[in-house]
Image (cartoon, rainbow, N blue to C red):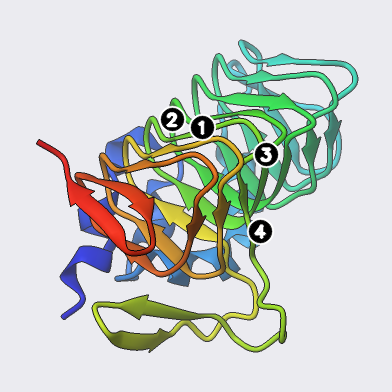
């Protein structure tokens, strides 16, 4: 049931240093409460020849480029060959994969970014998971708390699924492209190889291999 929401349908687990966090769970939102503690334990196991500590529970790959103006709070892991640009704001509980870009004034909190993810320009990503080679256009953000502060529910093919979480942003599968200045509302899940038009307001589940033009118009890719 709900097969297209399952971890195995959304992600390539070979493309993250955090593969073990997905063990014994079926749906990706179940991982979000585990990120903080998992980051600390994983950081302690990292190879000191490849990673160095740059503060309390902050591990940065020696090949990564981190701007001196970036603000990083632990726990945090920044992967190999990743670039963290001017005035990026990493608020903790963040696992950032290899070959990623965290851009100017981008803010991250309680996130897992697979390898080759780009959040390069004025993005907010909170309580979210971004799959391999996913990309968020300039100004696109995840909204991670409902306005009435109730727990986040997910709409999937007419069903309402409770997540049990007060904070959940978006789950992006592999190769997702989010257009500029889009808002991904709490509980959004986007299947792999999907494009979201710029200026979109997205809620619920968007199937893989599709183009999201607006809430009433989602077309299959050919």
The answer to whether the residue labelled 3 contacts the one labelled 4, judged by CB atoms less than 8 Å apart, is no
- Quote the CA–CA distance across marks 1 and 2: 4 Å
Residue positioned 29% across, 57% down in the render: 217
- Quote the CA–CA distance across marks 4 and 2: 19 Å
Q: Read off the residue under disc 2.
A: 115
The spot of residue 159 in percent (x, y) is 29, 87
The answer to whether the residue labelled 1 contacts the one labelled 2, judged by CB atoms less than 8 Å apart, is yes
Drawn side of residue 104 relative to residue 211, left or right: right
Q: Secondary structure at mark 1?
A: loop
Residue positioned 56% across, 35% down in the render: 180
Lower sequence index among marks 4 and 2: 4
- Give the vertical position of 26 relative to 44 (above or below): below
Lower sequence index among marks 3 and 2: 2
How many residues crowd around disc 1 within 10 Å: few (fewer than 14), some, or many (20 or more)?
Answer: many
Q: Read off the residue under disc 3.
A: 123
Front position in the image: 63 or 206: 206
């Amino acid at each position: 049931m709900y097969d297209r929401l399952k971890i195995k349908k959304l992600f390539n687990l070979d493309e993250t240093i955090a593969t073990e966090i997905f063990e014994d769970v079926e749906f990706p939102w179940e991982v979000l409460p585990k990120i903080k503690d998992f980051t600390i334990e994983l950081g302690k196991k990292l190879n000191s020849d490849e990673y160095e500590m740059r503060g309390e529970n902050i591990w940065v790959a020696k090949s990564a480029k981190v701007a001196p103006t970036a603000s990083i709070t632990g726990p945090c892991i920044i992967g190999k060959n990743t670039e963290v640009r001017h005035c990026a704001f990493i608020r903790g509980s963040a696992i950032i994969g290899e070959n990623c870009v965290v851009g100017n004034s981008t803010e991250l909190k309680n996130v897992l970014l697979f390898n080759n993810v780009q959040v390069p320009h004025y993005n907010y990503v909170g309580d979210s998971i971004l799959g391999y080679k996913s990309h968020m256009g300039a100004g696109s953000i995840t909204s991670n708390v409902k306005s009435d502060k109730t727990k986040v529910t997910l709409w999937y093919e007419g069903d309402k699924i409770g997540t049990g979480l007060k904070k959940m942003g978006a789950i992006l599968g592999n190769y997702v492209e989010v257009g500029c200045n889009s808002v991904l509302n709490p509980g959004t899940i986007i299947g792999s190889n999907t494009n979201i038009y710029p200026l979109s307001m997205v809620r619920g589940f968007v199937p893989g291999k599709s183009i999201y033009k607006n809430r009433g118009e989602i077309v299959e890719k050919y």
